Amino acid sequence: MASGNTNADDAYVRFEKVQKSYDGEILVVKDLNLNIAKGEFVTMLGPSGSGKTTCLMMLAGFEPATNGEIYIGDRSINHIPPHKRGIGMVFQNYALFPHMSIGENLSFPLEVRKMNKADSEKAVKRALDMVQMGDFINRRPAQLSGGQQQRIALARALVFEPELVLMDEPLGALDKQLRERMQYEIKHIHENLGVTVVYVTHDQSEALTMSDRIAVFNDGVIQQLSSAENLYEQPQNAFVAQFIGENNELNGVVEKIKRNTCTVRLADGTKVKAEKVNVDNVGDKTLLSLRPERVEIDPPEKMDAHLDGKIEELIYLGDHIRVRINVAGNDEFIAKVRNRGDKRELNEGQSINIGWAATDCKALDA
Amino acid sequence: MTDSTNVTDNGSSSLASKAVDERLVTSDGVPLKQKLAITTRRLRWRAFVLTIPLVLFLIFSFVVPIGQMLFRSVHNTAGTDVAPNFAAAIQKWDGEGLPSEEVFALFAEDIQASHKRREIGKTPGKLGTRVNYEFPGSLSLIKSSARKFKKIKEGPYKEAILALDKRWSNPVLWRTLKRVTRDYTPSFYFAALDMKYDADENLVAADDIYQIYVSNFWKTLRLSAIITFLCFLLAFPVAYLLSTLPLATSNLLMILVLLPFWTSLLVRTTAWIAILQSKGIINNILVFIGIISDENRVQLIYNQTGTIIAMVHILLPFMILPLYSVMKTIPPSYMRAARSMGATPFTAFRRVYFPQTLPGIAAGTLLVFILAIGYYITPALVGGADGVLISNLIANHIQKTLNWSLGAALGTILLVTVMVLYWLYNKLVGIDKLSFG
Ligand SMILES: Nc1ncnc2c1ncn2[C@@H]1O[C@H](COP(=O)(O)OP(=O)(O)OP(=O)(O)O)[C@@H](O)[C@H]1O
Ligand SMILES: [Mg+2]
């Protein structure tokens, strides 16, 4: 899937200038514009309270948008009640009806659609087989483990073949291992069925694993909407750089701008080269963002930037070694060194030189 | 299937653990089960000791009085208290014709002795009252005869007594005397069920004007059912509102719901009198608006309507609270899930929300119904003649007619009715499913 915003013409779900306020004082969603293509898996990722659930609820019809329009296909759905939107939903607490068996839970959406019994039974069986829960049709939700309930909730959201499925932190209650397996399963189901999925999470590895595109939310605004790779490699602003993946930060002032690169003077006076992302003028404050694995320790050749530092701490992690370095007055600077087995001589307290390529260091808004 | 969280295969593991049980010992060699029993016994003892005050209180305030009531409903010693020798002798009589001279003699002696003693609870009148329950008119006969018996100095007593009053020659009276001088008798239950003995000692339905208890039981059940149903209708929306409103607002509303609990029952009931009476607020408003004319004021109180209105008001919180406590635990995501799957708001409510409130409904209806069935004060104050419940009749026997045995029999029937209903309810709903909040 291409990165960047899908253009409005082939969008299936479209948020247009959507705003939302609960109390008339604070906008929890500010000017949301989002186009989602048919069959796409889009994740809304962001810290707690950033407005992800609110967006989902507006799409599902449980919260009215205060301003703006939401379209599905070419229909504005602002005034369509939830039960007529035909959207499947998976809730964080699963919301399986406790007084119904698994079979009854799954046939509920078919029943309210007045599907005949034979077809309904077939569809229920198919959906249960899809999540490998065919044997549990007569159980009650309370008799299932969390992971099993999760599968049933997924099957129930899909059994009536909606074209759009919303999931609000569906794996939030599961342990790490189960969560990872379910991530792949959901991903595969999405690929097999071709449904459009809008997924909410605040777990970034989950978002990176599953999504075609990720919308990074903060403070009611989409900070960046892009593929996982793009978010990591080309963060558009400091929030995204900090939120996605591990990140070293260095504060400085822009000295010189030359096309896509700029020279930045750090707090201790050293000058380094970095890629210009969203700084515009010489003299602006900037935040340099550098991934730990892109830092070279004692580089053999000359690189775009060099700094001297002192090793504060070494943490052995098997496949790599984390090196905490005091650089330019920042003693939280991390470098990851691959463990090649060549017994590199690194010791705590040792003075070293670090370097990086200008394209790996992003000059972002401070 | 590659599911590590599979919960189905616990059959084999429980089998395995059973085999191991026998061999489990603690590190000092005591079998594990025995050791466990010792430690848990100590805990149980402590728990038991802590509950002793409550247990004692319950025994004296609950078990003993109820036991007494059960006992009193079948035990009445009026006969043996007043005329012990006669009571023993007449039991040997076969009931044909009149008793023998010997029985008459003991009767005269016992009554004379009792008349002379004038000991409270052992006067001839006491026996007269007891006989009178089953043979109307005998109280005055026995009282007047008791005064005249002292003129009879010697036998034959039979002739002398028969000469005193011709009513003494009625064999039915003597058969009744034989029946009521037994200490243990089921006859108060028969009376409570509107039955009596006819002249030939057969159980028959009581005369129409004495048919009061059974119909009152039915009325009590019917009114309780109506009250429970009305409470449910009124409480459900309120509880729903309470459970969905923001906390600050719902707390305020909850205070309004609980307010009646902080007001005296009498105050609340008399407030209804002020509102409902024929010169009361409601009638005045209706007349003022012109819906009814001044002559045709509606009788809203001192009848069943009054009882229903006042009791619905008083019992409403007992319905609201369990409903509220259940509704509060139903997350809104259930309704949302149902709606997202295509259910209309009504279908979602009927199929998803309502069934989950059933434990609260069950608890609320049980609570209100059982409270209503034994309610006393409110019907006594606003029920008039028509709106009184069985408990008012029981109170009447305990306080006014002093026929405690009949009151006890009625009370026992009420108790058994409630227990049968509870049992039925348990069969149908399952007490473990109730949620009182
Ligand atoms: N029903 C509501 N009434 C008032 N404010 C609300 C309501 N629901 C959410 N908010 C507020 O709106 C903001 C966004 O909430 P939202 O639930 O969308 O966050 P979120 O991104 O889903 O967070 P999380 O990751 O914690 O689920 C929060 O500040 C929250 O306090
Ligand atoms: Mg949320």
Image (cartoon, helix red, strand yellow):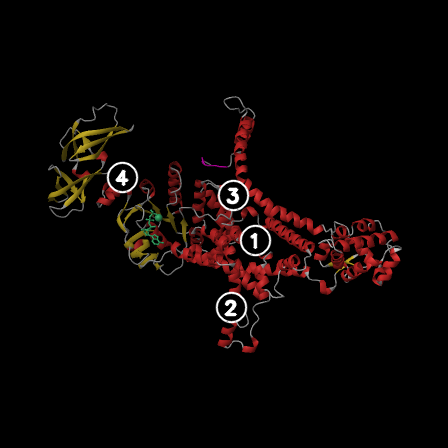
Q: Residue at x 52, y 37 (%)?
A: B47
Name which residue type carries label 4: Gly
| Dot 3 crowding, Cα within 10 Å, few <14, some 14–19, many 20+ | some
Discs 1, 2 touching: Cβ within 8 Å: no
Q: Quadrant of the C terminus of chain A?
A: top left
**Measured Cα–Cα span from mark 2 to mark 4:** 72 Å
Would you say residue A317 is visible in this rendering? yes
Chain under numbered label 2: B
Tell me if residue A178 is in the magenta stretch: no
Name which residue type carries label 3: Arg
In the displayed structure image, the side of residue B317 where residue A229 appears, left or right: left
Chain under numbered label 3: A
Q: Which residue is mark 4?
A: A245
Q: Identify the element where label 1 is drawn.
A: helix
Q: Which residue is mark 3?
A: A139
**Marks 3/1 same chain:** no
**Measured Cα–Cα span from mark 1 to mark 4:** 59 Å
Percent x, y of residue B380 = 59, 62
User: Which of disc 2 and disc 1 is earlier in sequence?
Assistant: 2
Q: Give the residues drawn in magenta, as a range.
A: B2-7
Q: Identify the element where label 4 is drawn.
A: loop
Viewer-closest of B91 and A254: B91
**Marks 2/3 same chain:** no
Marker count (numbered) = 4
Percent x, y of residue A193 = 40, 46
Q: Which residue is mark 2?
A: B275
